[in-house]
Amino acid sequence: MKIFVDGDAFPNLLKPILFKQIQRLHVETVVVANKRIDIGKSDLITYMIVDAGADEADHKIVEMCEEGDLVITADIPLADRVITKDAHAIDHRGELYSVDNIKQYLAMRNLMEKIRESGEMTKGPKPFSIKDAESFANQLNSFLTKHYKS
């Protein structure tokens, strides 16, 4: 199993949490972004910069991930694509996406997008918090404990 990080919007609060888990378990990790992202120095982490563009990092992650891999992303369409490949996805707030819930998240995301496109003002997501980082840390630890075999 590898971890793939959709790095373009990866919160700074999560970088030390993820780095600690990578080092603790010695899990190979690939950070994909269209700009330089630094989670930490490690032989276990590969940084990949893709061309600028809305979905370039997503396309690369989908191309590279395999069954059983973990993708960390807040991008619901990307999560849907990797789950289709029998990989796993966790968002920045600790939500574990699965075949059981991803279509609901995708439908809600698409509905909200249509509402915004119609000119309606929406609140958007709440600001990222320490509590969100703790939820992410707990979910990541739980997932890796259950799924990662070094």
Image: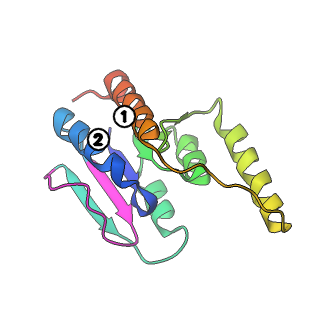
Q: Position of residue 42 (x, y in %)?
A: 14, 52
**Numbered label tally:** 2
Residue under label 2, please give it.
Answer: 17
* 57 w.r.t. 88: above or below: below
Q: Is residue 31 magenta?
A: yes
Mark 2 Cα shell of 10 Å, populated few (<14), some (14-19), many (≥20): some
* 23 w.r.t. 119: above or below: above
Q: Farthest right residue?
A: 118
The disc labelled 2 sits on which kind of residue? Ile
* 143 w.r.t. 102: above or below: above
Q: Farthest top residue?
A: 146
User: Which image quadrant is residue 8 in?
Assistant: bottom left
Mark 1 Cα shell of 10 Å, populated few (<14), some (14-19), many (≥20): many
- The way the protein has been coloured in the rendering is rainbow
Disc 2 and disc 1: Cα gap in Å?
A: 6 Å
For residue 137, the mark is: 1
* Element assignment for label 2: helix
What residue do we see at 84% from left, 68% from top?
A: 119
Report whether 54 appears left or right of 119: left
What residue do we see at 74% from left, 45% from top?
A: 108
> Range of the magenta residues?
29-43
What residue do we see at 30% from left, 50% from top?
A: 15
The disc labelled 1 sits on which kind of residue? Ala
What residue do we see at 49% from left, 48% from top?
A: 128
Q: Is residue 58 magenta?
A: no
Whichever of callouts 2 and 1 sits on the residue coming sooner in the sequence is 2
* Element assignment for label 1: helix
The reply to whether discs 2 and 1 touch (Cβ–Cβ < 8 Å) is yes
Q: Position of residue 147 (x, y in %)?
A: 36, 26
Q: Specify the quadrant that holds the C terminus.
A: top left
